[in-house]
Image: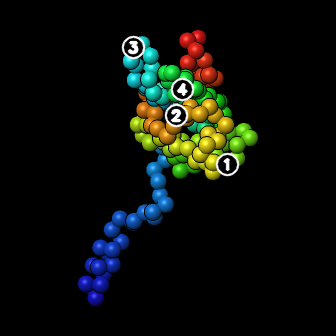
Amino acid sequence: MKLQWLILGWLLLQPVSRSNNHFEFIDPTGTYILKGVVQKNRIIGHSGELRVKLLLQDRIAISFYISSGYPNFASVSFVDTLSYEENSARYFPTGHSGCSLVFCFNYHDVELQQTYTDPVAGCGFANGAVISTSFKKKSAEQPLIQDLSCRGTGV
């Protein structure tokens, strides 16, 4: 009988295992940077900036800019509010229901992924403007959410 009570007591003291669906909430607020390589005073490869502000536990404000760099400098920018669920947000470009940009937030960066039904369409963006990549977190301070479309123009 004592052995049963000891086993029962031991079982009650064991940590409760978490389900596979559990995740740790990440506050995505901050500024994230994608740096292109500079060669001969030209930015080669993609560069960009992402600013995020947590509005509610399930809603973020976002300003986004990415450029393909030299020689085309194709770019994409937008400002929007997005649903935030399980540390990710999804952007659906207007008029292009077959694709989306997915932002997956980690503590030190955010991964940008593209999903689409037609890879040639490019979500309505200029060819090669958006790639799947990682933006490094530069600051956790609350950023100014604003249009970043002038980033690549020298303005």
Which of the two labelled residues, at mark 1 and mark 3, occupies the earlier sequence position?
3
- Closest to the observer: 9 or 100? 100
Screen quadrant of the N terminus? bottom left
The three-letter code of the residue at mark 1 reads Gly
Q: Position of residue 76 (x, y in %)?
A: 60, 29
**Amino acid type, residue under disc 2 in the picture:** Thr
Q: Quadrant of residue 93?
A: top right
Q: Which residue is mark 4?
A: 67
State the SS at label 3: loop
Q: Looking at the image, tell me whether mark 2 or mark 3 is earlier in sequence order.
A: 2
Would you call the spot at circle 1 few (<14 residues within 10 Å), some (14-19), or many (20 or more)? some
Amino acid found under the numbered disc labelled 4? Ser
Which residue is depicted at the point 47% across and 58% down? 22
Q: CA distance from mark 1 to mark 4?
A: 22 Å
Whole-number angstrom distance, CA of label 1 to CA of label 2: 28 Å
Nearer-N-terminus badge (1/2)? 2
Amino acid of disc 3: Lys
Number of other residues with Cα within 10 Å of mark 3, as a class: few under 14, some 14 to 19, many 20 or more = few
